[in-house]
């Protein structure tokens, strides 16, 4: 059972088309810089309007009930943890040796 972290949420936000359902019933959208949700009938400058709010991942992770990417459930809250479902694809992290370092195997000194 894999528990999602803030980096996982950020990665899903970069991919795009990731939506969440919060524990209070509101829907939001994951983006690379945080969770965005719309509040309808907000009063701004004495005028009723729709306002979009951003919550950083550190605060948002505790408020997320489930995460969907393109209508597929990829994570859900289970016993106070946000855990990945079988549809969540883990991104491969390259090894430190592979990051921008090219080794010449045929080099002999």
Image (tube, grey):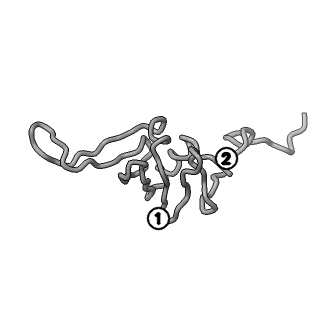
* Coordinates of residue 68 in the picture (x, y in percent): 48, 59
Foreground of the two, 24 or 28: 24
Numbered circle sitting on residue 15: none
Residue found at the very far top of the displayed protein: 109
Seen as rendered, the residue at the extreme right is: 109
Identify the residue at the far front of this view.
Answer: 79
Taking the spot 45% from the left edge, 41% from the top edge, the residue there is 60
- The residue positioned 45% from the left and 56% from the top of the image is 18
Q: Does residue 51 appear left or right of residue 44 in this picture?
A: right
Dot label at residue 93: 2
Q: In this view, does 40 lie to the left or right of 36?
A: left
Q: Distance between the residues labelled 2 and 1?
A: 23 Å
Residue beneath disc 1? 70
> Which residue is found at the position 58% from the left and 51% from the top?
78
Where residue 29 sits in the image (x, y, percent)?
39, 52
Left of 51 or right of it: where is 72?
A: right
Q: Residue at x 67, y 46 (%)?
A: 93
The image shows residue 57, relative to residue 25, as above or below, that is above
Report whether 46 appears left or right of 81. Answer: left
62 or 106: nearer the viewer: 62
> Within the image, what quadrant is residue 55 found in?
top left
Circles 2 and 1: CB atoms closer than 8 Å:
no
The first of marks 2 and 1 along the sequence is 1
Q: Position of residue 50 (x, y in %)?
A: 20, 49
SS class, disc 1 = loop
């Amino acid at each position: 059972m894999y528990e999602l972290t803030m980096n996982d949420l950020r990665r899903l936000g970069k991919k795009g088309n990731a939506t969440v359902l919060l524990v209070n019933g509101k829907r939001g959208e994951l983006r690379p810089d945080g969770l965005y949700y719309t509040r309808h009938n907000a009063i701004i400058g004495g005028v009723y309007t729709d306002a979009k709010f951003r919550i950083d991942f550190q605060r948002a992770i505790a408020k997320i009930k489930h995460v969907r990417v393109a209508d597929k459930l990829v994570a859900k809250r289970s016993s106070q943890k946000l855990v990945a479902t079988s549809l969540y694809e883990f991104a491969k992290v390259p090894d430190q040796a592979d990051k921008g370092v090219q080794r010449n195997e045929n080099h002999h000194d």
